[in-house]
Each structure stands twice: as C-alpha cells, then as structure tokens.
Image (cartoon, grey):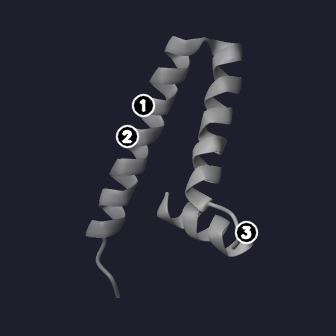
Amino acid sequence: MAGALEQIAAEHPSADAALILRLAIAYFAEVHARSFGHAATVKAMTAIARRGVQAAAEELAAVRH
C-alpha cells in the first residue's frame, strides 16, 4: 500500500493519494460485489489483505545483501 501511495503521489502531486487509493479499492469492491455478491467480495478482500500483510512481513524479514 505504501508503494501504491508513493506512485500515486508521484504521478499526481496535487491529488490526495490516500483518497485516490481508497476510491480505487471501493470501486473494485463495488464491481466485484455486482458479479459475485457481497459475501464473496468480503471474503476476497479479506484474503487479499491477509496476503498483503503476509507479503509485507516476509519483505521486512528478508535478508538484505
């Protein structure tokens, strides 16, 4: 998420990067829910968040050369 915020801020310096990211996530959730239902969307977003947290933990624990 931090990387996404940095990239948005770099590409659109006058915009609120955090707001743009939240709107993008909300848009994804809305479109997904229309096709798969709200329960499936919550399940998918929870899984995405878990993978994100796990990936971040692995990245922070990685040995740097």
The kind of residue on which mark 2 rests is Arg
Q: Nearer the viewer, residue 39 or 26?
A: 26
Q: Which mark is residue 50?
A: 2
Q: Which one is earlier in the sequence, the residue at label 1 or at label 3?
A: 3
Left or right of 56: which side holds 61? left
Image vertical order of residue 15 relative to residue 29, above or below: below
* Amino acid at pointer 3: His
Q: Nearer the viewer, mark 1 or mark 3?
A: 3
What label does residue 58 carry, if any?
Answer: none
- Residue to which mark 3 is pinned: 12
Contact, mark 1 vs mark 2 (Cβ under 8 Å): yes
Which quadrant would residue 65 be assigned to in this image? Answer: bottom left
Instruction: Give the image location of residue 58, x and y in percent.
Output: 32, 60
- Marks 1 and 3 close (CB-CB < 8 Å): no
| Position in image of residue 33 (x %, y %) | 63, 18
Q: Give the Cα distance between marks 1 and 3.
A: 28 Å
Tell me the residue that label 1 is attached to. 46
